[in-house]
Image (cartoon, helix red, strand yellow):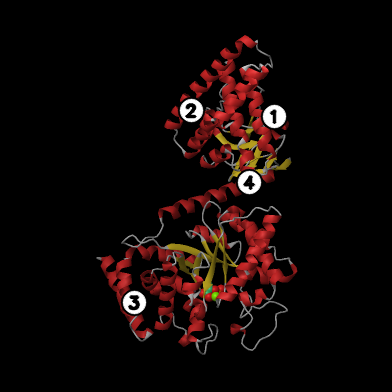
Amino acid sequence: MTEINGISSSPGYSIGRAFVYRHDKLVILHEHIPELSVNDEIERLDGCFSSLISEYREYLEHATGDSERALYSVELLMLDDVEYRKSIKKLISEKLYSAPWAVEEATEEIIRVISTVEDEYLKERIIDIRDIEYVILETLTGKRREHIVVRDKRVLVADYILTSELLGLEGLENIEGIVLDNGGKTSHVSIIAKSKKIPSVVGVAGFSSTLEEGELVIVDGEHGIVIKNPTDSVIREYERKKKEREKLLKGLDRRSEKLSYTSDGRRVTLDANIEWLEDVNDAISSGAENIGLFRTEFIAIKNDIFNSRDKKDEIYMETARLMSGRGSVVFRTLDIGGDKKTEGMIEEDNPILGWRAVRYMLAHKAEFMAQMRAILLASRYRNVKMMFPMISGVEELEETLSLLSDVKNELRRKRIDFDENMKVGTMIEVPSAAMISDILARKVDFFSIGTNDLIQYTIAVDRGNDKTNYLYEPLHPGVLRLIKLVVDNAHDAGIEVGICGQMASEILYLPILIGLGLDELSMSPASIPVLRGVIPSLSYGDCSRLVNEVLSESSHIEIERKVKEFLDERKTRNKK
Ligand code: PEP
Ligand code: MG
């Protein structure tokens, strides 16, 4: 058994026999033409380009998918490129190259230039350029490539594969996996593999030359690994992984049928709160659209945050990877302190009002920046968001954002990939933050209201003290007014606002939260199917009327009575 690392270019697992395809080089004779033939040679070149341009325009017109359209557009651009054609003609007229030789030379020159540029995307276009070069040379020389034909279920293993070859491949439905010696993540072959859901690993230099036709190969498109001649136990392990993934995807299909809308069409996003990497599966199978809150402090406390054994880099990366193509992940930076103390943290008289969350982390900048770095690294999956807990005022937020900008600069300097467009949000869980949410909303991309704390701090009632918990009341008019203020300020500033406190998961509060205009509710995975069942029976219009009514009430007792009456009415209406 041999295991080789490459680049994952399309997710999923496949286990199958290899179909090995290696290209013969199209041999172009390097011969000079007589000076008298220059005009004929240029005419031959123009004729070839004109017929290919009309051929490709027709392909483009009849292209069925985005990947095909993208491919033909890129190739047409190249065929239409005046400079490219000029450089070929120059070689013919000045150096007396034959047209195929001139095409080869002019194309190589473009590829040479692109290869020196530090831009992965451009480098990956080389395969498209080679593709069109091949097509031009075939047309000029009349040496047509044969179609690749794959009759049985196979893993396609090749030195490289031109996009036109893949699209023209007979038996594409038989391809269960793709492994290429060359190629990159964003090459069109990778895009096509992804859109056809074919697991694929590229950049496995030299692999195709070591393989015999029909040899057993495992393609691990999740981790960019290829295994040649796997042992029985590895095969079993991958069969299990493959089944698990299929199960996950089925859950996902159910999910997409079940995006939540109120009866009058207002969308409410249902996301999951998680604490551990293992919770991601629960989140997906419960139908969560995204991870709306990853409480990162739990793994940090368990693994001891201050001695870098907390494995955060791997855990964040793996979470983002598991959610990639499914939804986003909001990593909340460490909310330690308060009732979440770790070894070595000082005892305080009032820990809940003390050195907690961003306050604590701003005093431990190295650890704060290390966590931001880990989150930014995971953002390479382009589905990551970062959120700060316990922000109480603008200075705290600005200082935090400036640390984030330092970390980003460091990554840029080191040329480490991260999502430049990563969304950054803040929790609103301190009343002062709610009061100035109009100002905070101009500095971030989203809000998530932490009602667990917002209620605690608004009513001044310790959320963990059972002697006073009779005062802990989500429907307190003061709490509802604050939530309304935050939602309105967020929407006025054009940003989204959700709730990730316990309040989001209870049916009793649902009409109020919908009526207040929350865009997202994030909760423990188990509550998601329950709320999903209720949302379609509520109308946003009715809920906002209910909110208008209850906001002028003086007591939570009367508010609760009205909400219950509202829900009962709908229950009986739905039964009829
Ligand atoms: C909240 O305060 O509502 C919240 C989601 O954060 P935590 O419960 O972790 O404090
Ligand atoms: Mg909180």
Which residue in the structure is indicated by mark 1? 212
Q: CA distance from mark 4 to mark 2?
A: 41 Å
Q: Nearer the viewer, mark 1 or mark 2?
A: 2
Question: In the figure, is residue 258 to the left or right of 433?
Answer: left
What residue sits right under mark 4 in the picture? 238
Which residue of the protein is positioned furthest toward the left in this rendering?
A: 576
- Asked if 35 appears above or below 320 in the picture, the reply is above
Q: Nearer the viewer, residue 339 or 52?
A: 52
Of marks 4 and 2, which one's residue comes earlier in the chain?
2
Between tags 4 and 2, which lies in front?
Answer: 2
Q: Please tell me whether residue 304 is drawn above or below residue 457 in the rendered image.
A: above
Query: Is label 2's Cβ within 8 Å of ligand 1?
Result: no
The type of residue carrying mark 1 is Glu
Disc 4 marks a residue whose amino acid type is Tyr
Crowding at mark 1 (Cα within 10 Å: few <14, some 14-19, many 20+): few
First along the sequence among labels 3 and 4: 4
Q: Is residue 63 left or right of residue 125?
A: left
Where residue 202 sits: x, y (%)? 65, 39
Number of the label disc, if any, that sits on residue 563:
3
In the picture, the quarter occupied by the C terminus is bottom left
Q: Is mark 3 within 8 Å of ligand 1?
A: no
Q: What is the crowding at mark 2: few (fewer than 14 residues within 10 Å), some, or many (at least 20)? A: some
